[in-house]
Image (tube, rainbow, N blue to C red):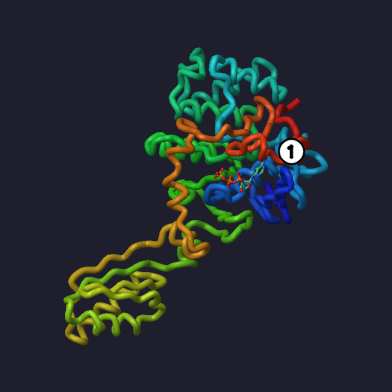
Amino acid sequence: MIKARGLQRRFTSRGRTVDAVKGVDIDVAEGELVGFLGPNGAGKTTTLRMLTTLLTPTAGEAQVAGCDLRADPVGVRGRIGYVAQGGGTGPECKVSEEIELQGRLYGLSKADAIARGKELTEQLDLSGLDQRLTKTLSGGQRRRLDIALGLIHSPKLVFFDEPTTGLDPQSRANLWEHIRTLRSEQGVTMFLTTHYLEEADALCDRILVIDGGEIVAEGTPDALKARVSGDGVVLGVDDDVTDRAAAIVGRVDGAHDLTTLPGEVRFRVPRGDTALPALLRAFDAEGLTMQSVQVQRPTLDDVFLTLTGRSLRDSESTDGATGPDGDTRSDDTTDSGHGNDDGHGGHNDDEKDDDEKDEVPTHVA
Ligand SMILES: Nc1ncnc2c1ncn2[C@@H]1O[C@H](COP(=O)(O)OP(=O)(O)OP(=O)(O)O)[C@@H](O)[C@H]1O
């Protein structure tokens, strides 16, 4: 569904250059749900905008939904759905009007647009809201409407840009459920950007981790976690036997990152659950007692920390200030049926890229 090679984007503005995306390769197979995970400014949105034809790559090639990104951008646009970060609904429009307009923009007849809209609003729990103005919808409802608009023309490949940013945890979990259902019922291939670790972990078959414009890791959530850090184990022992306990741990196959405090031995090991029985036997043999034991499965944040030396949690913790409900970005990412792409959020006009005039409008003929 997606095959990108050496995709690059350099922004130049008033003599300054930013290499936002530095030659990434991306492969997404039909039916996959792939997450593009990275901190703020990593290059997620820029990559997504290139793959959805909203931004011309500085270099590189891509096939998207069977069409060549450079040679046939109109073909790409007709075959993909795009659910933008800030959405694109008009606040004074009724839900039904938005849905019908979007369907017509994609070439559906009025009757087909209404029928497809009905099917999607039922699937997305929006039934009964069709006469409501979009500005009266809750954050979660509006996001589900954005998804309905992105799927109106039954695309086989859908891009989501940070689909749950700004939603409360309950609405976020609800939206994940809808995304999973759409994927299983409609067989849609999905590619989503996120900086939520839990989202990538819970939702995605496979994750690409991007940092500083480069893909730094790739794999299933479990494979990523297993590859990088292993399980963290914390043993509680009597203070006066800490050193003897640490010596036993040091002999455990694959144990690493061993540290001690009085009464505590911490280490990492590929599989904590299978290492423990042997460890208990070794303690018994030396007449030592284990007072407590905790095994912590690695998180994607451990993965990110190991790869980059920084925590993705820092990026998450700033989220309250950057979500749509308190958004500091005048975000550019436009819905596929509404408006043009006129610059990146978070950049004022002075910083706007000189090359952005080459961007294509987002309307589909
Ligand atoms: N139009 C632009 N002009 C100049 N620099 C830009 C422009 N758009 C993006 N950038 C820069 O490119 C880099 C990547 O930005 P991008 O928006 O792709 O990151 P991101 O991973 O999507 O971040 P976020 O999670 O905050 O949306 C950043 O350094 C950003 O400041």
Q: Residue 157: horizontal and vertical position, in percent?
A: 64, 40
**In the image: residue 306, left or right of residue 242:** right
Picture residue at 72% right of the left edge, 33% below the top:
78
In front here: 200 or 111? 200
Q: Quarter of the image holding residue 229? A: bottom left
In front here: 14 or 136? 14
Q: Residue 263: horizontal and vertical position, in percent?
A: 21, 74
Picture residue at 72% right of the left edge, 35% below the top:
77
**In the image: residue 291, left or right of residue 50:** left
**In the image: residue 143, left or right of residue 154:** left
Q: Is residue 148 above or below residue 248?
A: above
Q: Quarter of the image holding residue 217? A: bottom right
The residue type indicated by label 1 comes to Glu
**In the image: residue 281, left or right of residue 118:** left
- For the C terminus, which image quadrant? top right
**At numbered mark 1, what does the secondary structure look like: helix, strand or loop?**
helix
Picture residue at 65% right of the left edge, 22% below the top:
103
Q: Residue 204: horizontal and vertical position, in percent?
A: 51, 49
> Residue furthest toward the top?
131
Res 223 seen here: no
**Which quadrant does ligand 1 occupy?**
top right
How many numbered marks, from 0 up? 1
Res 153 seen here: yes
> Residue furthest toward the right?
71
In front here: 320 or 348? 348
- Classify 10 Å Cα crowding around label 1: few (below 14), some (14-19), many (20 and above): some
Circle 1 residue = 356
> Residue furthest toward the bottom?
286
Q: Residue 31: horizontal and vertical position, in percent?
A: 60, 46
In front here: 260 or 228? 260
Q: Is residue 111 above or below residue 39?
A: above
Q: Cβ of disc 1 within 8 Å of ligand 1?
A: yes
